[in-house]
């Protein structure tokens, strides 16, 4: 199928408005990356200093959301929006955002740009994420349980190692060869996580790496990633219209703290103007609202509202 239609910014914004939206910043993206890590370590510190069920669960939710935030900022780097210097943009996006979460900016960029080129079309590599919806509430409930119990994490992050060993054994490769192959593919993820584990160990908190880094990644991060994927493209009214093939979800403070970091909820605006930095999306939404454009876009309020569309009552 042909690539999706592109929106001309001049249709909706004056030259001055567009310049203010599209300008690259040498500090905003870096500040957001620093913010993500500061929040992660602050949440860890609170839970370590005042350990109780409330602070532990709070830390898991907050850290899992900032882990998604790192993935979102890597996504901005994939569009060249994190920093005007492409070398800085790519280094920060790779080492401080993507690899700590097991994602490669270099591999993600071509994949993601193909998603933008063929959004919701047969060639869209992300179509598999939205195609199952709408679904039943029982099915959605099972998915949520798998996320919260770590089953999704095991399937995505642990099982591939076992599969690699099984495949290598079937082909006659030795264990050292297999380990070398895995290390070559995952070495940056291992390096970043070794730095985290070493730093916490030097502080006498080696166990915090597993409780406050791996556990949020295993239980909360998969769930809110699923919610994000559902909200962005599931059950869209018009897959050929860029204003109706991606959804913006208006959020409150709690949703932004635990589900939708760094303006990820403004997804329709992102697909309409994919080279805007994430921090410009709220302003773009506000201007489009003032001009009456959002009335023609797919915009919902709150993730519960979106889930009601994705899994309607029988």
Image (cartoon, rainbow, N blue to C red):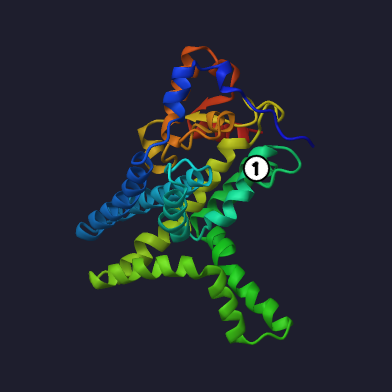
Q: Residue sitting at 66 percent across and 44 percent down?
A: 114
Figure check: 88 above or below 281? below
- The percent coordinates of residue 73 (x first, y second) are 45, 46
- The percent coordinates of residue 250 (x first, y second) are 46, 28
Q: Which residue is mark 1?
A: 115
Q: Does the rendering let one see residue 138?
A: no
In this view, the residue farthest toward the top is 291
In this view, the residue farthest toward the left is 49
- The percent coordinates of residue 80 (x first, y second) are 50, 43
Between 15 and 41, the one nearer to me in the picture: 15
**If the image is split into quadrants, where does the C terminus sit?**
top right
Figure check: 279 above or below 181? above
Q: Residue sitting at 45 percent across and 19 percent down?
A: 17
Relative to residue 87, is residue 313 drawn left or right?
right
Relative to residue 171, is residue 256 drawn left or right?
left
**If the image is split into quadrants, where does the N terminus sit?**
top right
Relative to residue 31, is residue 217 drawn left or right?
right
- The percent coordinates of residue 28 (x first, y second) are 35, 39
Quadrant for residue 2, please give it: top right
Q: Residue sitting at 54 percent across and 53 percent down?
A: 145
Figure check: 34 above or below 28? below
Q: Residue sitting at 49 percent across and 54 percent down?
A: 148
* Secondary element at tag 1: helix
């Amino acid at each position: 199928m042909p690539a999706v239609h592109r929106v001309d910014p001049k249709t909706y914004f004056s030259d001055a408005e567009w310049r203010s939206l599209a300008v690259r910043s040498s500090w905003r993206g870096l500040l957001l990356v620093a913010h993500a890590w500061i929040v992660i370590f602050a949440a860890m510190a609170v839970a370590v200093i005042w350990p109780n069920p409330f602070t532990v669960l709070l830390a898991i939710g907050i850290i899992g959301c900032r882990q998604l935030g790192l993935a979102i900022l890597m996504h901005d780097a994939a569009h060249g929006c994190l920093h005007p210097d492409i070398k800085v943009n790519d280094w920060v996006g790779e080492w401080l955002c993507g690899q700590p979460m097991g994602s490669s900016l270099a591999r993600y960029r071509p994949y993601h740009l193909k998603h933008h080129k063929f959004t919701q079309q047969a060639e869209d590599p992300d179509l598999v994420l939205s195609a199952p919806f709408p679904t039943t509430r029982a099915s959605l409930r099972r998915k949520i349980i798998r996320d919260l119990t770590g089953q999704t994490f095991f399937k995505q992050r642990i099982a591939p190692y076992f599969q690699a060993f099984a495949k290598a054994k079937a082909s006659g490769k030795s264990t050292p060869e297999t380990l070398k192959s895995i290390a070559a593919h995952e070495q940056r993820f291992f390096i970043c996580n070794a730095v985290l584990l070493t730093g916490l160990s030097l502080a006498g908190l080696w166990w915090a790496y597993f409780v406050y880094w791996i556990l949020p990644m295993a239980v909360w991060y998969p769930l809110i990633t699923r919610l994000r994927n559902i909200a962005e493209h599931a059950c869209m009214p018009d897959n050929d219209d860029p204003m109706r093939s991606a959804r913006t979800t208006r959020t409150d403070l709690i949703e932004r703290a635990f589900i939708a970091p760094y303006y990820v909820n403004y997804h329709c605006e992102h697909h309409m103007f994919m080279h805007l930095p994430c921090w410009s999306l709220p302003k773009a939404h506000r201007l489009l609202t003032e001009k009456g454009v959002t009335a023609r876009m797919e915009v919902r309020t709150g993730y519960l509202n979106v889930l009601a569309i994705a899994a309607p009552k029988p």
